[in-house]
Each structure stands twice: as C-alpha cells, then as structure tokens.
C-alpha cells in the first residue's frame, strides 16, 4: 500500500505543489491547507499550491532588493494563472501568445507563443537584445 499524506501530516516543506484534481475534494483541501497555502486553479482538473504570501512576484521583489535593482527595470514573461502576481510586480509584463485571456488583459505586451520563440521575439521587441 502506498503512503498517504495523512501518514506524514506536518512532516513536509512544500515550495510548490501541483495536483490533478479530477476526484479531489477541493473544499476539504482549502479547509485543511488554506491557511498555509495559496491555491491557483489552472483548470477544473489542475490546481497549484504555494506557501501563503509567496509567489513569483515576491521572488522578483526580493531579488531586486538583494541586487539593488529598481523593480521598474524588470521584465516578466508568463502564460498562466501562476504568473499573475509576477505580472503585477514586474516593471514590464509580457504575456506569451498562448497565454490565458486573463493574463493577456494585464499585459504591457503580448508576444508570440512559446513554440514561436515568443521570449526571443518579446526581448527583441522590448529592445533587450
């Protein structure tokens, strides 16, 4: 028999957890883990959890703080719900052409898709290369 999470309750450090939620009781997950983790719902079958208050945006902010870089000089590339806070934090939000509509609505620029070399195209468009 495979171990279940209950057998190890509290004996973990999770920086990111992605789960298939096809048959999951998401309300129970939120009740039991919601105080410690933020939930990002990718679709009706995929969920991602990260420690509360920590996300890609806080990562960018911390790196800028450590390096003495003004956050307005940062460029973020993303395509999904887990990139939302990063887009809000970065100085320039560039969303991939294959990105979600919600993310595209936040974009300073929508580049080509990942498979069309969107990051390279976006960097050229922004004058970074």
Image (spheres, helix red, strand yellow):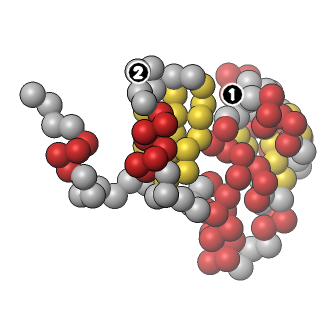
Residue at 78% x, 67% y is: 71
Q: Residues within 10 Å of mark 1 (few under 14, many from 20)?
A: some
Residue pointed to by mark 2: 23
The label shown at residue 49 is none
Looking at the image, residue 75 lies above or below residue 96: below
Q: Position of residue 96 (x, y in %)?
A: 76, 32
Q: Could you tell me which residue is drawn at 67 percent across and 44 percent down?
A: 83
Q: Nearer the viewer, residue 8 or 57?
A: 8
Mark 2: secondary structure: loop
Camera-side mark, 2 or 1: 2
- Quadrant, the N terminus: top left
Residue 112 falls left or right of residue 50: right
Which residue occupies the foreground of this view, 19 or 115? 19
Along the viewing direction, whichever of 119 and 104 lies nearer the viewer:
104
Residue 13 in the image: state x and y as whole percent.
34, 58
Compare marks 2 and 1 and give the one earlier in the sequence: 2
Residue 129 visible to the viewer: no
For residue 15, above or below residue 65 = above
Q: Is residue 116 above or below residue 72?
A: above
Crowd tier of the residue under label 2, counting other residues whose Cα lies within 10 Å: few below 14, some 14–19, many 20 or above: few
Q: Quadrant of residue 101?
A: top right
- Residue 100: x percent and y percent? 74, 29
Indicate the quadrant where residue 24 lies: top left
């Amino acid at each position: 028999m495979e171990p279940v999470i209950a057998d190890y309750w509290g004996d973990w450090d999770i920086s990111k957890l992605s789960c298939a939620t096809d048959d999951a009781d998401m309300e129970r997950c939120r009740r039991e883990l919601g105080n410690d983790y933020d939930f990002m719902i990718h679709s009706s079958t995929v969920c991602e959890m990260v420690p509360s208050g920590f996300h890609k945006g806080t990562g960018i902010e911390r790196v800028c703080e450590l390096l003495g870089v003004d956050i307005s000089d940062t460029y973020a590339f993303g395509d999904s719900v887990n990139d939302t806070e990063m887009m809000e934090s970065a100085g320039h939000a560039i969303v991939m052409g294959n990105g979600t509509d919600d993310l595209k609505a936040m974009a300073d620029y929508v580049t080509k898709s990942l498979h069309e070399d969107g990051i390279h195209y976006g960097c050229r468009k922004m004058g970074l290369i």
